[in-house]
Amino acid sequence: MLEKVQQGFSLRMNSHPGGARHYKATSCFLSAAMMLDWLAERSRDESPAIAARKIERAVDEVFSCRKALPFELGGSAGTRALRDAVLSNL
């Protein structure tokens, strides 16, 4: 599923809260990965890029195993459930 996100689906683009349980945590995780990639490129240090890959793999694992699907993908996982699932894969 992460490939779909990277191809331009809106998960990454909209991070405005739509209520406490509807905040798009996926966009926060992937935005953090994007910022780490930028930092790695800018600083010519590989460490942030490695951290970015770990975040992306954790999100991908949650989606591929369907551990916690967020509302925007038709699931019922709220912000906390998605956060906990992703963090458990880091």
Image (spheres, rainbow, N blue to C red):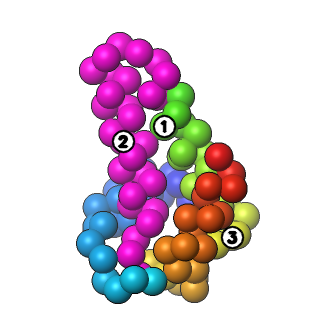
Range drawn in magenta? 22-49
Give coordinates of residue 57: x percent, y percent.
61, 46
Cα separation, mark 3 vs mark 2, equals 23 Å
The amino acid on which the numbered mark 1 sits, given as a three-letter code, is Ala
Rate crowding at label 3 as few (under 14), some (14 to 19) or many (20 or more) other CA atoms within 10 Å. few
**Given the image, on which type of amino acid does mark 3 rest?**
Arg
Q: Are marks 3 and 2 in contact (CB under 8 Å)?
A: no
Q: Which label sits in the foreground, 3 or 1?
A: 1
**For the residue labelled by badge 2, is the local secondary structure a helix, a strand or a loop?**
helix
Number of other residues with Cα within 10 Å of mark 2, as a class: few under 14, some 14 to 19, many 20 or more: some
Q: List the residue tagged with mark 3.
A: 66
Q: Are marks 2 and 1 in contact (CB under 8 Å)?
A: yes
In screen coordinates, is 10 left or right of 75? Answer: left
Q: Give the residue at mark 2.
A: 34
Is residue 48 shown above or below 60?
above
Of the image marks 2 and 1, the number of the one nearer the N terminus? 2
* Sequence-earlier tag: 3 or 2: 2
Pick out the residue farthest to the top: 44
* Res 48 → quadrant: top left
Q: Nearer the viewer, residue 32 or 8?
A: 32
| Separation (CA) of disc 3 from disc 1 | 21 Å
Residue 1 placement, left or right of 19: right
The one nearer the camera, 9 or 49, is: 49
Q: Is residue 19 magenta?
A: no
Give x and y (percent) for residue 26: 46, 63
Q: In this view of the protein, which residue sits in the foreground, 36 or 12? A: 36
Q: Which mark is residue 52?
A: 1
- Spot occupied by residue 31 in the image (x, y as percentages of width and height): 36, 50
